[in-house]
Image (spheres, helix red, strand yellow):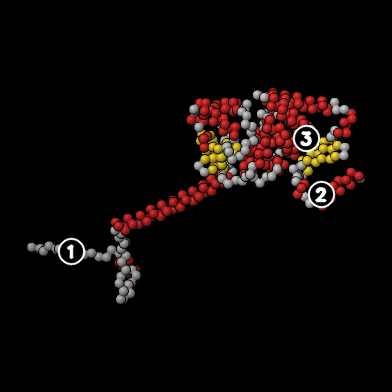
């Protein structure tokens, strides 16, 4: 009987070369653990939270940076009047600035209302924020049109008006200039309205202006020299008969200048003009202008009929524009009269004597 042979499995190293090339560990030291470190659930959650926190902080920093940029842009655009918002018409006041428009109703306002009703407002008004409300700077006619439309229709779309928001704190002179320049561009403002504003500006205690001459120079700096001269003459005309006029804005330029010249030469003509206007009780601009034209014709006829013996009593009048303003001169036999806004009483006596000496020396030359 033969014996069966048993087979045994022997495990041999599969890669003896790798084992031979392994880095030997110095004697007396522990063999390093090359196994990958394992993290528990808590460590993973902490790492994920930290990563999310960093991302959120970066997002918040980017948002703050964007907000700062938008805030600076908003301030810059507001100073330039480029921010437009819908403002309640009842929140807009018109008391800070004396308006350069006549208090009589604008005959073209109805046309503006039709345009706004059909097309909307293409040119927003401009306002300055004051407390909880706003102060009107530009756009008196547009604001009036919106108020009338809302009163007539009750339509809520006319309860608020598009308005350019200006930054607060601009000097009063600058606000007046903004209002005046807009109407100068429109070309439909009368010389009487411009003169009335100059007089009101000079009388306003909030301004540093002390005379109408200075007011005209400040408010109408962008107007040409001739136009400023006309405005000053109309201001003088209003000084004479402004209180008796109902429709000063309707006075044509030529008529106003002629009347101002006659009134400067003849104080009695001023009294007659006031009496005629009061007696006429004109209800229209046309009727009032007819009264003024009739008075001017009478004054001219009276000058032509003056007796020959009174020739020496007639005056020669003219105006001169000097750096200090307009000087009105009246000359007759043995008399020279100068009228100006300058306060000659405050000047030094020696300075006046030198000026008069130079004046007579020039006449004798």
> Residue 310: in sight, yes or no?
yes
> In screen coordinates, is 287 left or right of 299?
left
First-in-chain label (1 vs 2): 1
How far apart in space, not on screen, are marks 1 and 2 (Cα)?
A: 143 Å
Q: Are marks 3 and 2 in contact (CB under 8 Å)?
A: no
Seen from the viewer's position, the closer of residues 122 and 125 is 125
- In the displayed structure, would residue 56 be above or below residue 8? above
* Residue 50 coordinates in the image, percent (x, y): 37, 56
Residue bearing mark 2: 352
- In the displayed structure, would residue 1 be above or below residue 213? below
* Residue 202 coordinates in the image, percent (x, y): 67, 42
Residue bearing mark 1: 8
First-in-chain label (3 vs 1): 1
Q: Residues within 10 Å of mark 1 (few under 14, many from 20)?
A: few
Secondary-structure class at tag 2: helix
How far apart in space, not on screen, are marks 3 and 1 (Cα)?
A: 144 Å
Residue bearing mark 3: 264
* Residue 364 coordinates in the image, percent (x, y): 91, 44
How far apart in space, not on screen, are marks 3 and 2 (Cα)?
A: 24 Å
First-in-chain label (3 vs 2): 3
Secondary-structure class at tag 3: helix
> In screen coordinates, is 192 left or right of 166?
right
Residue at (30%, 76%) from the top-left corner? 28
Secondary-structure class at tag 1: loop
Occupied quadrant, residue 213: top right
């Amino acid at each position: 009987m033969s014996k069966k042979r048993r087979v045994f499995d022997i495990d041999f190293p599969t890669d003896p070369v790798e084992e031979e090339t392994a880095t030997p560990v110095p004697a007396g030291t522990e063999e390093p653990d090359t196994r990958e470190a394992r993290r528990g659930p808590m460590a993973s959650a902490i790492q994920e939270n930290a990563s999310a926190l960093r991302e959120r902080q970066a997002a918040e920093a980017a948002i703050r940076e964007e907000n700062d940029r938008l805030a600076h842009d908003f301030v810059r655009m507001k100073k330039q009047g480029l921010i437009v918002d819908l403002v309640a018409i009842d929140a807009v006041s018109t008391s800070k600035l004396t308006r350069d428009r006549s208090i009589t109703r604008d005959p073209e306002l109805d046309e503006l209302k039709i345009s706004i009703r059909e097309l909307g407002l293409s040119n927003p008004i401009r306002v300055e924020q004051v407390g909880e409300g706003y102060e009107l700077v530009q756009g008196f006619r547009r604001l009036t049109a919106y108020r009338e439309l809302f009163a007539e229709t009750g339509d809520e779309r006319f309860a608020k008006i598009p308005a350019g928001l200006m930054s607060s704190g601009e000097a009063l002179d600058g606000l007046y200039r903004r209002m005046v320049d807009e109407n100068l561009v429109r070309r439909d403002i009368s010389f009487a309205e411009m003169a009335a504003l100059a007089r009101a500006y000079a009388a306003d205690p909030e301004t540093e202006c002390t005379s109408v001459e200075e007011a005209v120079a400040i408010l109408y700096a962008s107007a040409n020299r001739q136009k400023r001269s006309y405005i000053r003459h109309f201001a003088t005309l209003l000084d004479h008969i402004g209180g008796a006029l109902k429709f000063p804005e309707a006075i044509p330029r030529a008529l106003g200048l002629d009347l101002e010249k006659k009134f400067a030469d003849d104080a009695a003509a001023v009294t007659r003009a006031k009496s005629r206007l009061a007696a006429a009780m004109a209800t229209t601009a046309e009727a009032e202008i007819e009264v003024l034209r009739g008075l001017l014709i009478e004054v001219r006829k009276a000058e032509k009929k003056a007796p020959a013996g009174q020739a020496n009593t007639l005056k020669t009048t003219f105006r001169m524009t000097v750096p200090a303003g307009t000087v009105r001169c009246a000359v007759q036999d043995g008399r020279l009269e100068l009228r100006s806004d300058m306060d000659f009483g405050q000047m030094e006596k020696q300075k006046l004597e030198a000026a008069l000496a130079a004046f007579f020396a020039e006449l004798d030359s």
